[in-house]
Amino acid sequence: MIKLTPVAFGLIFALAIVPPARAQVTIDATKITCEQYTSYKITNPQNIAIWLSGYYHGKRGDTTLDTQTLVANAKKVRDYCFRNRQKLVMEAVETVFGTSR
């Protein structure tokens, strides 16, 4: 029994210093509202704008990336969302840029 005590303390110590696992969260982008987008409730709006840009570029088969256009387009969507807080972000993109975006 005495020989097991150091082992038990070692295991307890090892488990105590292991950081808790983070939960993986999946978000359905079609359900993000403009209010959530502009108020940082999901994540930084820039992250969502980058994802949306990739999504719509992928739909068109376009593999180019223009960072200036990305920033300008994100600002247009943000401005639209400030005026239409109950709309969905995907609707905002399609309204601001048309369905081909």
Image (spheres, rainbow, N blue to C red):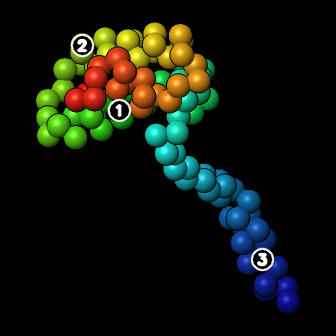
What amino acid type should be assigned to the residue bearing mark 2? Gln
The residue identified by callout 1 is 52
Q: Which residue is mark 3?
A: 8
Q: Of circles 2 and 3, which is in front?
A: 2
Task: Reply above or below: 23 against 77.
Answer: below
Residue 68 badge? 2
Total marks shown come to 3
Image spot of residue 40 (x, y percent): 58, 24
Compared to 101, does 24 lie above or below? below
Query: What residue type is disc 1 on?
Result: Leu
Which amino acid type is shown beneath numbered disc 3? Ala
Q: Inspect this view and state whether residue 53 appears.
A: yes
Tell me the residue at 28%/23% (across/down): 98
**Mark 3 or mark 1, which is nearer the start of the sequence?**
3
Say whether residue 28 is left or right of residue 55: right
Residue 9 in which image quadrant? bottom right
Task: Find numbered disc 3 in the image and state the secondary structure of the residue it sits on.
Answer: helix
